[in-house]
Amino acid sequence: MEYISTRDKNNSVSSTKAVIEGIAEDGGLFVPKEVKPIEDLNSLVGYSYNKLCKYVLSYFFDDIDDGLDEAVDKAYDEKFKNGVLKIRDLGDIAFLELYHGVSLSFKDIALSILPQLMRLSMEKEKIQEDMLILTATSGDTGKAALEGFKNLERFKVAVFFPNDGVSFIQERQMITQEGDNTYVFRLMGNFDDAQREVKDLFSDAEFLEELKKMNLRLTSANSINIARLIPQVVYYIYTYLEILNSGKLSKGEKINFCVPTGNFGNVLAAYYAHKLGVPINKLIVASNENNVLSDFFKTKKYNSNRKLIKTISPSMDILVSSNLERLLFDLTNDDELIKMKMKSLKESGYYSIDVDTDLFYADFMKQDEVERHIKTVFDKYNYIIDPHTAVAFGVYNKYLAETRDLTYTVIVSTASPYKFPKEILKAFNISAKDELDSINKLAILSGTEIPPQILDLFNKGQTREIVVDKGKMKEKLLNTIK
Ligand SMILES: *Cc1c(COP(=O)(O)O)cnc(C)c1O
């Protein structure tokens, strides 16, 4: 499979090269040159997750000759004690729980295999240097990346989290991180500050030169990398096939997925699954109050000129949604146009584009509505969802009220409720004296077991973090990894 840049179709590279480079030289994102439907998708019914994953990855990474199967088995092993995912069919609605990995968010699924795909790509491309993975996190990517790359030879991983913006558990997960090659930084600012500084480092010649002296190459673990995106396509196909297998869908019958979104990575993966042949009726795109995306789908105008709002679904507090560029390229197949629009976004924070997005429905949820939906779901189904998932559930309800569409719908559940105990208890007006108390109360309320990863956080006394002021990232990072 060849990959081309969204801003220059003639810039074409192998998959291994796309993984190593992360982002195209022209500033564009790599996309698969052509995604064709799998000929007999239904014949894959009954495949185990790993088997299907091997099948899908070998389609997208066909220039990796050897090692893919082993990589998949390494990524999805006993780390996922209860399986990679769980489909919860509650009668008139189904939730797809993607949060059973080490860090308890869906990001574990892609970030468990990303290091393997990078390693294989480094071998294929004969990369001599080691890799520095540098990532700004709005909460969940950080921990999942730290865990994914922990103690792996030839990798160092540095994560910057905003002092202002992540939940207590998310923060605790990062500052108690173990591993000889992991570095955790607390940036005194918000996520946009962290993201901006990290982005600047990627084009900072002096910084890159310093890394070179240390035999390091810079790369990112966020969803601009195709090795982060493609593994997510697998769970949509798997889920569809499982539901088909269960008899709840008949052959050819369509399905809806409703996805809580920030950077548009997870929705885009569903879109690729659609291109591969999963019969999708609607992709329901759910935003929180940072509703740039839902505004875009309604008006075809993207406007990031607004203030970032801090919400109880912090992993979706994003104003520049990188992966939308990939969708727009796919819909238009016009690299010149995309280049122009992205230039406009960079210069003025705005663009408008004329595209047909009929496959998508989009809307957003306000904070108080999110809390209300957490409670509604519990009252109706005796089932607790996290605030990100509640955003999706709420938007699905709006969709249902507007369309009365009875297509079988799967709500993508992106984080464990145990990552947001306080926020959830608030929806029930239950008070707690501290975080641990809130976790215990959540366990009682939900009748579920506290994940051991959560309890561990409170047993680890030692914390490691490096505090950094705004504008000082480069200096601190270089001094630390030396
Ligand atoms: C990252 C994240 C999202 C948003 O996913 P995107 O791929 O960026 O759209 C939603 N929910 C949770 C819990 C997340 O961690």
Image: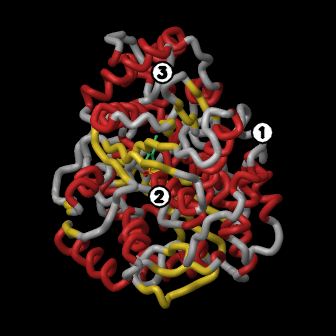
Q: Is residue 29 left or right of residue 42?
A: left
* Residue at 32% in and 38% down: 403
Q: Are marks 1 and 2 in contact (CB under 8 Å)?
A: no
Q: Quadrant of the C terminus?
A: bottom right
Q: How is the image coloured?
A: secondary structure
* Residue at 43% in and 49% down: 283
Residue type, label 2: Leu
Residue 193 image offset from top left, x and y in percent: 30, 57
* Residue at 67% in and 45% down: 241
* Residue at 28% in and 55% down: 297
Q: Earlier in the sequence, mark 1 or mark 3?
A: 1
Q: Is residue 1 left or right of residue 344?
A: right
Residue under numbered circle 1: 78
SS at mark 2 in the image: helix
Q: Nearer the viewer, residue 166 or 375?
A: 375
Q: Nearer the viewer, residue 14 or 114?
A: 14
Q: Is residue 348 above or below residue 378?
A: below
- Give the CA distance from mark 1 to mark 3: 25 Å
Query: Within the image, what quadrant is residue 284 found in?
Result: top left
